[in-house]
Image (cartoon, rainbow, N blue to C red):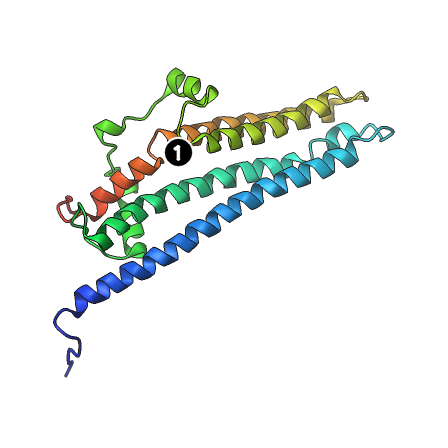
Amino acid sequence: MHMNLLPPDSSAATGKDLAQMEYLSLREELHNLKNCQVTFLTYSVTGTGLLLGILGRPGLSTESSLLLLLPLTILLPFWWVFFDKAKTITRIVGYYRLLEKHMLSVGLDIDFIGWENGLAKFREWQQKGRLKIPDDQTPRRGVRAIFDALFIRTAHPYWILVYAFFFGLSGLCLLLALALPSQKGLGFWLILVAAGLLFLLSAVVNGRWVCRLIWGRNSFNVNECFWVQVLTRDAPRS
């Protein structure tokens, strides 16, 4: 026979304890993700600087033009991973805000189901298109988003500056490879075109991510709204 050995109010206490544990765990996770991003930036600068310093010396063979594209093997993957981590950070922060309100019993009646269960439900709703951006969080698109990004008209300039950093270093590698005087055959031009296409793809996709992180569906505020839809008791059920 199963016996309930917990006191009558233990479920609430256990929920609060779990919320406190998640609060500390998510804070550590955010710290680790930000450290990971700093590591990507550091390795990008160090790796690119070393490779260009070695490969750009005078007196190297004509293959140096192609070797100057080698830093792209570091820059382009790190560019993608950096902003993928940024999307993870904004999603966690959105949940973190509601978790704070739940612990303080402020504002919302949260249906607290834990981080992993909540994340599974979040992804399910995301795949089904059930997460709706509120009217007061209308994302900026097109010319307006580009204009605001160019003039850094945002409360989060960090992502724009990081984007410019990866864009500038990657573009520099392409320009140096093109400008280095050497005999450039068909193979060189095929590789250069392929590298240029990967660069353009990275620039476009990561540019969209930057806009979404600052003004769109991956922003802090919109992610908080998504979590409200998923976790509040009065949210529609699937």
In percent of width and height, residue 53 lies at 76, 34
Decide which of 167, 62 is in the foreground and name it. 167
Q: Residue at x 40, y 28 (%)?
A: 211
Q: Which residue is found at the position 52% from the left and 33% from the top?
A: 162
Give the residue pinned by disc 1: 213
Q: Image height check: is 153 above or below 222?
A: above
Q: Is residue 82 above or below residue 193?
A: below
- Dot 1 falls on a residue whose secondary structure is helix
Q: Would residue 128 be visible to someone looking at this image?
A: no
Quadrant for the N terminus, please: bottom left
> Residue 10: where, in percent of width, then height?
17, 70
**Most distant residue in the bottom direction:** 1
At label 1, the amino acid type is: Leu
Q: In the image, is 148 to the left or to the right of 4?
A: right
Total numbered circles: 1
Image coordinates for residue 129, horizontal then vertical, percent: 26, 37
- Residue at left offset 38%, top offset 17%: 144
Q: Nearer the viewer, residue 42 or 205?
A: 42
Q: Is residue 59 left or right of residue 37?
A: right
Residue visible at 22% across and 62% down in the picture = 15
Q: Tell me if I can see residue 190 in this picture.
A: yes
Label 1: how many residues lie within 10 Å, few (<14), some (14-19) or many (20+)? many
> From the viewer's perspective, is 209 left or right of 3?
right
